[in-house]
Structures are given as C-alpha cells and as structure tokens.
Image (spheres, rainbow, N blue to C red):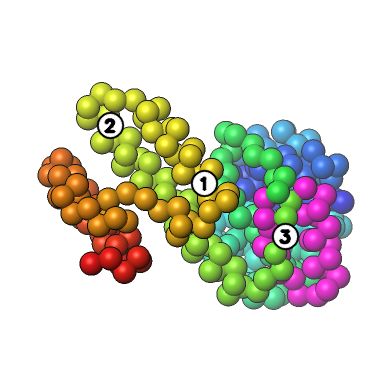
C-alpha cells in the first residue's frame, strides 16, 4: 500500500517505521517541522514535504498524526480527493474528516516515543470508518502490523482515551513523584522497579480492583498519618490524601 503521513512526532514516527517494516511504501512525510519531517522521511525512504498542498493524492492512505488541536486546521488545508484520509487521535471525533469522501480513524492505544520505536504487535487499534470498505482496509492494515483491533465509535474511543490517561499518564506521574521522594534521600529509583513490574504483572491475571493493596485499601489510618508527616509538602500531602480517599471510597471503607 502507498501511504503518506502528516506529522513527524511520536505517533507518526512509530507508525511510519512499523508500516515500512510491514512492507508498505511510505511516499511522503508532510508537516511544518522541517527538521522533524526531513529526519523521519530519511528513515523511511520517503519524500519530505514542507506544505500540505503538494501532497500526492494518488496514494492509498493518508495518515494525519498531528496534535488534536491542529486536526481541523490540517484537514481544512488538505485538498479533496478519493484517498482514504485517517486520523490517529483518541479524543477527536471522526466528523472532523467529513469533507473527505473516504475517511476514518486508526487510533493506536499505546504510548510512544520517537527515541524508542515500539513494536505494534498485539497493540490494540481503535478503528472507525465511514464505509465498510474503508473499515476493512484499516482492519487489514492492523492485521499486517500484528496488532489487535476494536471497531468502536467516536464516543467509545474517547472513553478509551480517558481510561488510557488514568492507566498510563497518571500512573507515570506517580512514578515521577515517587522518584522525587527517593532522590531527596539519595535512594535510586531502581529500588522500585521490581515493585512496579510486579504491579503490572499481577493485572495480567487479576482485575485491578482485586489487585489493590496498601494502607488505603486496608484503611490503616496510622500508617497513612505517618506517611503524611513524612512528606513535608502541602502539594504532595493533597495528592496523597485525595488518592487515598479515592481508594478507600472505591472499596467502601470508612
């Protein structure tokens, strides 16, 4: 399949490289970040395009891997064509692409970094399309990448995105807080890695609800009071109290 991509960020980089490795031809990498698109285009043997209008519309698929707030502007700037135009956002409805005869959504439910290309094997893709033909094309694409898929509408996908923020972004922020607490005592973050790995491993066979442990889960007020005293930070105390209260109320502990 001949594919072009608008964007050169984390998602664009990971999709471009995985698609190329799966045997697809990446024709153009377009965008406004000249250095970014040039670098990515070089990695996938594509042509870098600094503007949107010169995009080759004879391709089979155009992937819009841009920030959510830029999607509508990018879509409006693109010429109409019969090319299947797809965005990769978790929180933007499919309607933003209504001007295109063939359009859809190909949202990978995964965290990405440009510096570390992630295999898409078993990664779930949330798929939505305006026709069955376009849906089938995106399903086949996911299959060729070794990925899983979910056929869901825009509202369901937004809920997946919210859930992903809790599961990934918020949990990673907690790791950052934990790291800062340890650094104050010159303790390496590596001491927590086995705990984090076991936490993730447990939810492979337990519901997160059943896997919860800790002082808030068992309503150990003495330990929680001592933790609050140890923090010596109003900001961290508020976070600790809020999360502990959320855990306690989740299990109806008072």
Q: Is residue 206 magenta?
A: no
Q: Is residue 90 visible?
A: yes
Which residue has dot 1 on it? 202
Please state which of the two labelled residues, at mark 1 or mark 2, is closer to the viewer: 1
Q: Is residue 198 above or below residue 79?
A: above
The residue located at (60%, 61%) in the rendering is: 89
Q: Position of residue 193 (x, y in %)?
A: 43, 32
Q: Report if residue 128 lies within the magenta region.
A: yes
How far apart in space, not on screen, are marks 1 and 2 (Cα)? 24 Å
Residue count near mark 1 (Cα–Cα under 10 Å), binned few <14, some 14–19, many ≥20: some
On residue 182, the disc is: 2
- The residue range painted magenta reads 123-146
Tell me the quarter of the image containing the C terminus: bottom left
User: Under tag 2, what secondary structure?
Assistant: helix
From the viewer's side, name the closer residue of 105 and 225. 225
Instruction: Tell whether 227 sits left or right of 15.
Output: left
Q: Is residue 52 above or below residue 81?
A: above
Q: Residue at x 60, y 68 (%)?
A: 157
Compared to residue 79, the image places residue 56 above or below, namely above
Residue denoted by label 3: 149
Closer to the N terminus: mark 1 or mark 2? 2
């Amino acid at each position: 399949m001949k594919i072009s991509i608008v964007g050169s960020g984390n998602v664009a980089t990971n999709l471009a490289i995985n698609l190329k490795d799966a045997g697809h031809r990446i024709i153009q990498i377009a965008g406004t970040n000249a250095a970014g698109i040039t670098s990515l285009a070089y990695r996938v043997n594509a042509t870098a395009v600094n503007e949107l209008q010169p995009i080759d519309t004879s391709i089979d698929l155009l992937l819009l891997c841009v920030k959510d707030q830029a999607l509508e502007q990018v879509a409006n700037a693109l010429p109409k064509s019969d090319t299947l135009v797809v965005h990769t956002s978790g929180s933007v409805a499919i309607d933003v692409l209504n001007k295109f005869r063939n359009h859809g959504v190909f949202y990978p439910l995964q965290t990405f970094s440009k510096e570390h290309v992630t295999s898409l094997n078993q990664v779930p893709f949330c798929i939505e399309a305006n026709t069955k033909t376009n849906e089938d094309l995106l399903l086949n694409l996911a299959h060729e990448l070794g990925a899983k898929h979910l056929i869901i509408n825009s509202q369901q996908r937004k809920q997946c995105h919210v859930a992903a923020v809790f599961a990934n972004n918020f949990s990673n922020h907690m790791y950052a807080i934990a790291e800062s607490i340890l650094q104050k005592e010159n303790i390496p973050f590596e001491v927590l890695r086995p705990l984090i790995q076991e936490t993730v491993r447990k939810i492979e066979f337990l519901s997160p609800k059943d896997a919860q442990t800790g002082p808030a889960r068992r309503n150990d007020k003495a330990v929680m009071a001592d933790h609050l005293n140890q923090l010596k930070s109003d900001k961290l105390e508020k976070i600790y109290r809020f999360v502990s209260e959320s855990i306690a109320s989740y299990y109806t502990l008072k």
